[in-house]
Image (tube, helix red, strand yellow):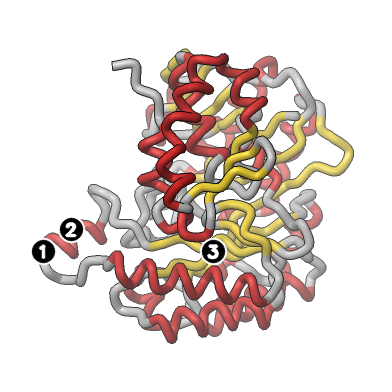
C-alpha cells in the first residue's frame, strides 16, 4: 500500500522553533491549490498500488477552505485507487477549529486530526510564538470530539527553557483528561536558521538543557506507561492500537508520494524532493513540469535508513529481515556494532529482534549513528 502527502506551506504566524518550509502569508493560496491539483494528476502513474493513507501536512492545512479541500480530495479520488477505509489525516491548529470547519472536514472525508497543541500553558505558547491560548487548545480537542472525531492526535513539546517539570507533568495530565488516543511528544530542538536559534545566540532566550530533557522524558515515559499508552516510536504514544498509520508506513520504508513545495517522495529505490520555493513550484507546475531533484539510494544508504527508522519503533530490527534485504556483510556489521550496547543494556535481543531498552531510548540518536555503515 502507498501513502500520499500534500504539503500546505501557509501559516498565520511562523513559530520560533519551526524549520519546515512554511510561509507566514496567504499570498498565492489559490494558485497553490491549482498547482497541487495539477501535480496530483501529473504524478498519478508514480503510484502503482492503492493509497492506504492521505496526509495533509504543513504549514497549517487547517487554513484550507471547504472548496479548496474539496478540489484536492476530488482530484485524488478521481485519479488514484484508494483502499476501502483509508486513514485521511489533516494537521490542524486550535485557532482554526470551529464546529463549521469540523463539519466541512468530515464532509471531505477527513477522519483523523493531528492538532498542534504544543502546550496547555499560555506562557509556554508565547515562548513558542503560537497564536492560540491554552483555553482554546482544550476547547479545540473537546469540540473535535463533540463533532464525532474519535481518531485525534495532539502534539506536545517538552524541554522548553521557560517551563518546569511540574508544568510538563500538568501538560500530560491535561492530555490524559481529554482522553486523546494518540500523543506525539517532541523535545524542543534548536534548528539552524530559525528564530529560536537567533534569539539564543543573541542572549534573548535561554538555551535548551540536556538535563531538563532527560528529566522530562523520564516523566513522559512514566506517565504514559501508567495510563496505558504504548510507546510505539520514540516520540509517539497511543491507546488501543491507534497508531498513526501514515507515519508508521514511513518508518517501515513503504512507498509514498509527496506533492507540493518541499514535499518528499520515496518509491523504495529513489528519493525525490520538490523545490522549497512557492513561486518556483507554482510556475513550474503551471508549465507541466515537476520542479524536483532526486537521488538513487545505494544499498548502504538504504541500510542506514532502515536502522534509523526501525530502531526508533517498538518493533525494532528483525535480523532475518535485515539479512534478507541487505545480505550477510551488513548483517555481520550490524551484529558487531550492537555488541557493546547489548552489554551496556541499551539494546536488547528478544528472539531474533533487536530493540532499544528504556535506557537506550534516552540516547537513541547516538546509538543509531554508531550503527550506521560507512564504507569509508
In this rendering, is residue 151 above or below 346? Answer: below
Looking at this view, is 363 or 339 the one in front? 339
User: Which residue, given by chain and number where applicable, does mark 2 sit on?
Assistant: 198
Structural distance between the alpha carbons of marks 1 and 3: 28 Å
Q: Where does the image place residue 187, in percent across and percent down from the top left?
A: 41, 62
Q: Can residue 278 be seen in this view?
A: yes
User: Which residue, given by chain and number where applicable, does mark 1 sit on?
Assistant: 202
Residue situated furthest front in the rendering: 343
**The disc label shown at residue 155, or none:** 3
Label 1, secondary structure: give it. Answer: loop
Structural distance between the alpha carbons of marks 2 and 3: 24 Å
How many residues crowd mark 3 within 10 Å: few (<14), some (14–19), many (20+)?
some
**Labels 2 and 1 touching (C-beta < 8 A):** yes
**Labels 2 and 3 touching (C-beta < 8 A):** no
Quarter occupied by residue 157: bottom left
Q: Is residue 146 left or right of residue 90?
A: right
Q: Where does the image place residue 123, in percent across and percent down from the top left?
A: 37, 82
**Labels 1 and 3 touching (C-beta < 8 A):** no
Label 3, secondary structure: give it. Answer: strand
In this rendering, is residue 327 above or below 204? Answer: above
Amino acid at each position: 500500500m502507498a501513502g500520499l502527502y500534500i504539503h500546505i506551506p501557509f501559516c498565520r504566524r511562523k513559530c520560533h522553533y519551526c524549520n519546515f518550509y512554511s510561509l507566514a502569508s496567504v499570498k498565492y493560496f489559490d494558485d497553490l491549490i491549482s498547482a497541487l491539483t495539477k501535480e496530483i494528476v501529473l504524478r498519478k502513474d508514480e503510484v502503482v498500488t492503492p493509497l492506504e493513507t492521505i496526509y495533509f501536512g504543513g504549514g497549517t492545512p487547517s487554513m484550507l477552505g471547504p472548496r479548496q479541500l474539496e478540489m484536492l480530495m476530488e482530484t485524488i479520488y478521481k485519479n488514484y485507487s484508494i483502499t476501502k477505509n483509508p486513514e485521511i489525516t489533516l494537521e490542524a491548529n486550535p485557532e482554526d477549529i470551529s464546529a463549521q470547519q469540523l463539519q466541512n472536514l468530515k464532509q471531505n472525508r477527513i477522519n483523523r486530526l493531528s492538532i498542534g497543541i504544543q502546550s496547555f500553558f499560555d506562557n509556554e505558547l508565547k515562548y513558542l510564538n503560537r497564536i492560540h491560548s491554552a483555553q482554546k487548545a482544550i476547547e479545540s480537542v473537546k469540540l473535535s470530539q463533540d463533532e464525532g472525531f474519535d481518531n485525534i492526535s495532539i502534539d506536545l513539546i517538552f524541554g522548553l527553557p521557560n517551563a518546569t517539570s511540574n508544568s510538563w507533568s500538568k501538560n500530560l495530565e491535561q492530555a490524559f483528561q481529554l482522553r486523546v488516543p494518540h500523543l506525539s511528544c517532541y523535545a524542543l530542538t534548536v534548528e539552524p536558521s530559525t528564530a529560536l536559534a537567533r534569539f539564543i545566540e543573541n542572549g534573548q532566550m535561554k538555551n535548551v538543557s540536556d538535563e531538563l530533557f532527560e528529566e522530562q522524558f523520564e516523566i513522559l515515559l512514566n506517565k504514559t506507561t501508567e495510563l496505558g499508552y504504548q510507546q510505539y516510536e520514540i516520540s509517539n504514544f497511543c491507546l488501543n492500537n491507534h497508531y498513526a498509520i501514515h507515519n508508521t508506513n514511513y518508518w517501515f520504508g513503504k512507498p509514498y508520494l509527496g506533492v507540493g513545495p518541499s514535499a518528499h517522495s520515496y518509491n523504495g529505490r529513489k528519493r525525490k524532493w520538490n523545490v522549497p520555493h512557492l513561486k518556483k513550484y507554482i510556475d513550474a507546475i503551471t508549465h507541466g513540469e515537476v520542479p524536483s531533484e532526486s537521488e538513487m539510494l545505494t544499498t548502504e544508504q538504504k541500510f542506514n535508513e532502515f536502522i534509523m527508522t526501525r530502531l526508533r519503533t517498538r518493533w525494532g530490527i528483525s535480523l532475518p529481515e535485515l539479512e534478507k534485504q541487505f545480505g550477510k556483510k551488513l548483517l555481520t556489521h550490524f551484529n558487531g556494532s550492537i555488541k557493546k550496547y547489548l552489554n551496556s543494556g541499551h539494546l536488547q535481543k528478544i528472539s531474533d529482534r533487536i530493540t532499544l531498552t528504556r535506557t537506550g531510548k534516552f540516547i537513541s540518536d547516538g546509538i543509531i549513528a554508531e550503527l550506521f555503515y560507512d564504507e569509508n
